[in-house]
Amino acid sequence: MKHNRRVVRIVAIVLAVLLAGSVVVGALFAAMAEEAPARDRCTLNMEYIEEAQALRIEQRLVYCNDGPDPLDRVVFYAAPNMLRRESALMYENDDLEAVFFAGYAPGGLDLRSVRVDGGAADYGFQGEDELYLRVACDLAPGASAAFDFDYYLLLPRCGAFVGVGAEDVRLGAFCFIPGVYDPGLGEFSLKKPLPFTRWLYSRPTDYEVRLSLPEGCLAAATGVQAGETFSAENVREFALAFGRRWRVTERETSGGVRVRVFTSLRSGGRIADMAIRAVEHCAEWFGAFPVDELDIAQSDYPLGTLNYPGLVLVSSDRMRKGGEDLEQALRFCAAQQVFGLSAYVEPSADAWLSDSLCNYLAYMMLEADRGRDAFLKAINRDWVSDLQLTVPGGLRVTSDASLFEGKTYETVVMIRGAVVFHELREAMGAEDMLAGLKLYREMGADGRTLTEMDLVHALDQATGKSWEDFLTDWVFNVGDYVEQSIDWLN
């Protein structure tokens, strides 16, 4: 009996230790879950049907309700539906002929079915132009649901952000992407497409994409490619392009970033070298570049560049001309991979925090490559005439991008916004400014959306001074340059 009681006590002690251990392990896993909330996961199985000029897509999105409210629906972007009718197109009249070089033809999404957690879903398109899709669900805070979409993407011959051209088939904002839920408003925040800047407001997501292409096609995309499969982690948008005419030139930066140039031109090596210099400037100033692979592809998109995580689409015309214009565009796109795409800002309401800043950083890269005199010559050539223009409507550097037209946006945000950062740099010094921007970039490492006050706090922390009044004064008064006679901007 004594022996049996001793055995029972030993077993009880062992069980108690195991139970305590399981509690500790459970607590550790719970703490890890709090520190690293689950990201959305999207898988795409796609086949390009060349004769139909369409993509057959099966998409599964595992959506995590990481907010405090139960959700009875999730609202998704359905941006390609912009192509359904000519009246819905976002492009300005002066650009329409260039974008629809073969004349307007309809395209968009042909949705076959939507399922939530395996069951048929209640869904419907929303908005005058059916740019959003509402899908009913029942999601408690902290819960996840699998949304399955079966659809065709019909691609017209055009140079839009989705479309088919002679050089490429391009796919940006082409699948169903959930909007960002705002618990304060109790609704999803979604933006209308814009032709002159980034506009898609979205959540960090992990993508696994399988693309079946006709023989002879090469693909450039967000993320890392392995055969017909692409994978990308923690990105706000997945984009790709493919074509038959391209040859690939591949280089690697000193930090191990793989740069690939897809072009039918002979200048692939020169373009890769331009991109590498820009990437290495970003890495020197702000830390490791945010993507392991940067693809730069020649595109039939006619309005300059389209910039996505790990993918830059450059117009054929800009690639052919090459020279300083192309180099500046690549510098801007490299900077925006850091500020805007990785250190994320709301792309419409706070567009200046990406576009004004990255435009100025592109000129700072030019200065690093060619010296102060070349820098001053460039900013006087490119900025001064626009600084002298009177802009109607009270638009400021910080105004929401949706309020602008293309030329006004270039004048106010791209140029006057860059002047704001130039005045800041002249006041605080380049070294302190770059140190502040590095801190600003690090503030976005947890995936949250950065704001103007984050920028101010980073600059303050880097210098031990307060810059809010200075920055505010220049943001709201840079238009005073209109009243001045400028012989040379220093």
Image (cartoon, rainbow, N blue to C red):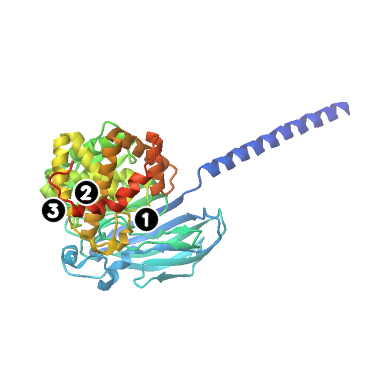
What is the quadrant of residue 16 in the picture? top right
Of the residues under marks 1 and 2, which one precedes in the sequence?
1
Question: The N terminus is located in which quarter?
Answer: top right
Whether residue 450 appears in this view of the structure is no
Separation of marks 1 and 2 at Cα, in angstroms: 22 Å
Of the residues under marks 3 and 2, which one precedes in the sequence?
2
Q: Left or right: where does residue 92 sit relative to residue 39?
A: left
Percent x, y of residue 26: 62, 40
Q: Categorize mark 1 by other alpha carbons within 10 Å: few (<14), some (14-19), many (20+).
A: some
Outermost residue toward the right in this view: 1
Percent x, y of residue 221: 29, 49
Q: Which residue is mark 3?
A: 317
Q: Left or right: where does residue 205 sit relative to residue 34?
A: left
Helix, strand, or loop for circle 3?
helix
Q: Nearer the viewer, residue 294 or 408?
A: 408
Which residue type does callout 3 highlight? Asp
Helix, strand, or loop for circle 1?
strand
The residue that appears at 41% across and 45% down in the rendered structure is 454
Q: Which residue is mark 1?
A: 45
Q: Categorize mark 2 by other alpha carbons within 10 Å: few (<14), some (14-19), many (20+).
A: many
Percent x, y of residue 122: 48, 70
Q: Nearer the viewer, mark 3 or mark 1?
A: 3
Which residue type does callout 2 highlight? Ala
The residue that appears at 31% across and 64% down in the rendered structure is 80
The residue that appears at 36% across and 57% down in the rendered structure is 349
Q: Nearer the viewer, residue 97 or 256?
A: 97
Q: Nearer the viewer, mark 1 or mark 2?
A: 2
Separation of marks 3 and 1 at Cα, in angstroms: 32 Å
Q: Of the numbered discs in the image, which one, if any, rests on residue 297?
A: 2
Percent x, y of residue 472: 34, 49
Helix, strand, or loop for circle 2?
strand
